[in-house]
Amino acid sequence: MSIEFVLPGDIEKRSFEIIASELGDVQIPDDIRPVLMRVIHTTADFDYLDTLYFSEGVIETAMRAIRRHSVIITDTNMAKAGINKAALARHDCSCECFMAEPEIAEIARQTGTTRAAASVDHAALLHQPVIYAVGNAPTALIRLTEHIRQGTFRPELVIGVPVGFVNVVQAKEMLIESGIPCIAARGRKGGSNVAAAICNALLYMADSKNSPHCREKLSGM
């Protein structure tokens, strides 16, 4: 097995070429292709072709949310760190994670819930459009669906890709059944890296609406 020499600046491009080659004749709708390609690039896992769920019209919903300068709320600082800050700035969007805030920890302690659920309650008080990206905590998704059902909080979009074993599958199915615009990774797989990858893919897609160069870049994904 020989080592392939690739310049550092070309590694991502070469990775997408390899993914496209391995996909072969697999047909992926154009609107969701950049998201799927970036998730596969992040995870090296082609199972997402079958497990990544997109609610009807969710990509256009995401584009509208970005145009409205939404704040992206994540359930881990790892996901927050992985979201491209320059891309956020280009669209006058921001990203927040409340999980490490002392007041969130105290609320969770007093109410006997998780910091992830308390963070959802805190986000519900924000007076701006929200994209909620969950890569770790199914309790965040469960609390989100409770708010949606009660009409007390309705994000523009929910990205539901927590990874794990306890209530993970159930929480994702609850999200899908809620009717909220969502992208969800059915099954046990997911993670903060997947949540960040989806956010980045959507931000880059929003870039492509305004930049011919970005449209050319996305066409290879």
Image (cartoon, rainbow, N blue to C red):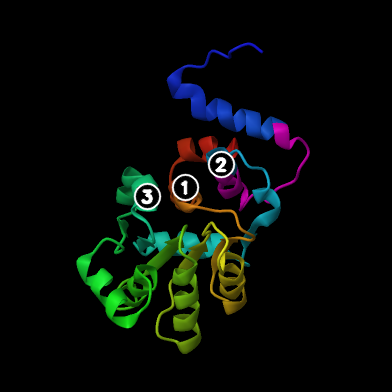
Tell me, yes or no, whether the two marked residues, 1 and 2, touch with CB atoms within 8 Å.
yes
Q: Which stretch is magenta?
A: 22-39
Along the line of sight, the residue nearer the viewer: 172 or 199: 172
Amino acid type of the residue that numbered disc 2 sits on in the rendered structure: Thr
- Relative to 155, is 58 above or below? above
**Residue name at image x 47 percent, y 54 percent:** 195
> Measuring 56% from the left and 72% from the top, which residue is drawn there?
175
Callout 1–callout 3 Cβ contact below 8 Å: yes
The percent coordinates of residue 119 (x first, y second) are 33, 70
Q: Which mark is residue 193?
A: 1
Q: Which residue is label 3 attached to?
A: 78
Question: Amino acid under label 1?
Answer: Asn
Upstream in sequence: badge 3 or badge 2: 2
Disc 1 to disc 2, C-alpha distance? 8 Å
Give the labeled residue for mark 2: 43
What is the quadrant of residue 100 in the picture?
Answer: bottom left
The N terminus is located in which quarter?
top right
Q: Is residue 163 above or below residue 173?
A: above
Identify the residue at horizontal 50%, vertical 67% (top origin): 138
* Mark 1 vs 3, N-terminal side: 3
Q: Nearer the viewer, residue 168 or 209?
A: 168
Q: Position of residue 173 (x, y in %)?
A: 62, 71
Callout 3: few (<14), some (14-19), or many (20+) C-alpha neighbours within 10 Å? some
Mark 2 crowdedness (10 Å alpha carbons): few <14, some 14-19, many ≥20: some
